[in-house]
Image: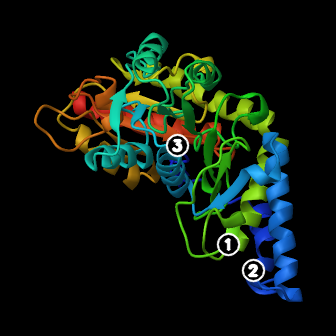
Amino acid sequence: MNIYLDNAATTPVDPDVFEAMKPYFLSDFGNPSSTHAHGRKVRSAIEFARKQVAQLLNVTPGEIFFTSGGTEADNTLICSCIDTYNLSHAITTKIEHHAVLHTLENLEQQGKIKLSYVALDEKGHVDMQDLEKLLKENERSLVSIMHANNEIGNLNDIDEIGVVCAQYKAIFHSDTVQTVGHYQHNLRDLNVHCITGAAHKFHGPKGIGFMYINKNTKINPFIYGGAQERNMRGGTENVPGIIGLAKALEIAYQEMESHQNHIQGLKDRMIAKLKNSIEGISFNGDSDNPDKSLYTVLNVSLPPSPDNDMLLFTLDINGISASGGSACSSGASTGSHVLGGINADPERGAVRFSFSKYNTAEEIDFTVEKLAEFYNKVEA
């Protein structure tokens, strides 16, 4: 059996997305910046795709900018907001994706900003009182807090965060890479200045993403060299990728409720079966609370064992693809910064299982069976 349970890393491309992209590799290959017929046809397709994305997110097409992915979008928005608005302070969490953390840490090392980290509870949720305290002390900050964590799956209330940021005139950026295509985003009614998305997280192609920038938020470009994306992102557009992103988001919105129910059912099934199969197992994040946990991600906290380092390898040789790690132990330079950020026990191993619409109950049962076999063997 070949089981893929690492969908938070990347998802398989939906066949309908692939079919939508194919003409832009083969027949409709023109450069969209060219003024001849080949170029105009492709330019029209890009703008139609932009309109599709904008309509689904309830914004205007002029607020959507295509990038090479979520990392470029995060870098652009963070650096350009700080530069354009001459901000000297930023607030984030210690469990953000490295596209956010490393960018902000580098800016602090350059002396461009002072960086503060908002407190988190043991589940990884933002302490709203601490956020407000930091904003009171540092008005007109950049706040960069993700919607859902890619490792432990905790959901932050970005509506509430946005309201507090607006109260203190902060610029609010949210990395929504794990939730775009999995939840409805009505950006017109959300107090957020900018968000990011990546197509390969919702069954689109790799190498394409987008950033939403509220029409009232004007920032300088991050990449120069051309007039593409209305002078906001130089470089010839990834046309097949843009078409694929829009098609994938369209499919995601059409099938969202049924996919949520299916995937949440798989997650609940795995939680119940793991509890019954392995004594001492627990879960990182807020997995038992569907309202506060990303339904596509389950981070399993494993009982302490000297054999934990072999678990991912054991799963792999059984045809199961997952990802994992542990919190950084004292003095160690490696380990999950996310698990370390919520003070997880470094002696316990961790495996992240992340699900998609293509997974089945049979795959979940087989995976739990192999995990149980591993730990029964360890205990024996």
Tell me, yes or no, whether the two marked residues, 2 and 1, touch with CB atoms within 8 Å: yes
Mark 1 belongs to which amino acid? Ala
Quarter-of-image position of residue 156: top right
Along the line of sight, the residue nearer the viewer: 306 or 19: 19
Q: Which numbered disc, 3 or 2, marks the residue that appears first in the sequence?
A: 2
In this picture, is 26 found above or below 141? below
Q: Which numbered disc, 2 or 1, marks the residue that appears first in the sequence?
A: 2
Alpha carbon distance from label 1 to label 3: 22 Å
Mark 2 burial class by Cα count in 10 Å: few <14, some 14-19, many 20+: some
Q: Among all residues in the image, which is located at the extreme front?
A: 86
Q: Which mark is residue 85?
A: 3
Q: Nearer the viewer, mark 1 or mark 3?
A: 3
Mark 1 burial class by Cα count in 10 Å: few <14, some 14-19, many 20+: few
Q: Which mark is residue 33?
A: 2
- Which element type, helix, strand or loop, lies under badge 2? loop
Q: Which mark is residue 227?
A: 1
Tell me, yes or no, whether the two marked residues, 3 and 2, touch with CB atoms within 8 Å: no
Alpha carbon distance from label 2 to label 1: 9 Å
Name the residue: 10% across, 36% down. Answer: 331
- Which element type, helix, strand or loop, lies under badge 3? loop
Q: Is residue 305 visible?
A: yes
Name the residue: 25% across, 37% down. Answer: 308
Q: Does residue 49 appear left or right of residue 231 in this picture?
A: right
- Provide residue 59's location: percent of width, then percent of height: 80, 42
Mark 2 belongs to which amino acid? Ser
Of the 4 image quadrants, the one containing the C terminus is: top left
Mark 3 belongs to which amino acid? Tyr
Name the residue: 26% across, 47% down. Answer: 109
